[in-house]
Image (spheres, rainbow, N blue to C red):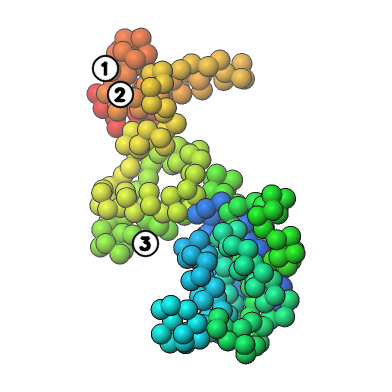
Amino acid sequence: TDGIIGSSKKLEEVIARVKLVAPSKATVLIEGETGTGKELIAQSIHQASPRARAPFMAVHCAALPATLLESELFGHERGAFTGATERRVGRFEAADGGTVFLDEIGEIGPEIQVKLLRFLETKSFERIGSTKTITVDVRLVAATNRNLEQMVKEGKFREDLFFRLNVVRITTPALRERPEDIPVLLDHFIRQFAKENAYDPVTIDPGAMRHLQTYPWPGNIRELRNFAENVVVLRRGGVLTEFELEPKFRGEVPGGPVLSSPAPANPLSVEENEKRLLREALIKARGNRTQAAELLGISRRTLHRKIAQWPELDVYGRG
């Protein structure tokens, strides 16, 4: 489980399942949204297994057309098809004793599904253009961001293959389901990119971090990683405040109202609601108190008094 960062309950459940399944020979199906680290989980299963010293081969099924994918997995003989100028050893053969990871398994076509099913049942195959049967000892770990059960119902994925793949299922949680891991992940990526570029690390202030923890991160860890690289490269040190975040991270909708004031669900939270509106106005005004007061419809003196009462609202500390 080296390289898996975080301590949330959902992530701990995944790690526990990885440790449980790794020593076995069982086929594993990893499901989850794009960018949730499915390949990292597959690598962790391999590294924690008795196969750790043998090869780990990753194949991204969606990146290859069917003819090339078949050759990539099973190999081919010279002259097997146009362009096959020499023999090619496939990933299953090359990974003998180790693990093959098939990412985006839901993208493979019917012919490959049949051949993959036979391989899972017999651990044997023939190279394209050959009648010689090759038997290997390979563990298969597959991953998908699609609903394979729904694909089976729609006739797009073989039911027998699904059952062969789905011996043990691991679901990688979306980043929005583990917001408590966001600070430690950001710290890791920021330090990594700062070191790679020889820049000072960027510090994210508490106000900005709160917004980043409530943002849904549709691209998951991949999007978070890109965000970290962006702030390191563009800022080269310093402190990132909530005022400097892109509007999407602050929950702002283009074309929406300047300020909204929904009634608080809790009648005792009037003070918190007022503080929220003040903070929102300061964000809209990028710390300019005169503009913030105009947005709120109050005097600048009243705003000064509120900020003196709650100084944590004004990150910039502008006059």
Is 317 on the left or on the right of 128, as rendered?
left
Label 3, label 2: how far apart the Cα atoms are: 33 Å
Is 128 on the left or on the right of 274, as rendered?
right
The residue at 41%/54% (across/down) is 225
In the figure, residue 258 lies in which quadrant? top left
Around disc 3, counting alpha carbons within 10 Å, would you say few (fewer than 14), some (14 to 19), or many (20 or more)? Answer: some
Q: Which residue is mark 3?
A: 192
* Mark 1: secondary structure: helix
Q: Are marks 2 and 1 in contact (CB under 8 Å)?
A: yes
The residue at 49%/49% (across/down) is 220
Label 3, label 1: how far apart the Cα atoms are: 40 Å
Q: Which residue is mark 2?
A: 285
Measured as percent of width and height from the top left, residue 251 is found at: 44, 31
Measured as percent of width and height from the top left, residue 177 is found at: 59, 45
Around disc 1, counting alpha carbons within 10 Å, would you say few (fewer than 14), some (14 to 19), or many (20 or more)? Answer: some
In front of the other: 210 or 53: 53
Q: Which residue is mark 1?
A: 290
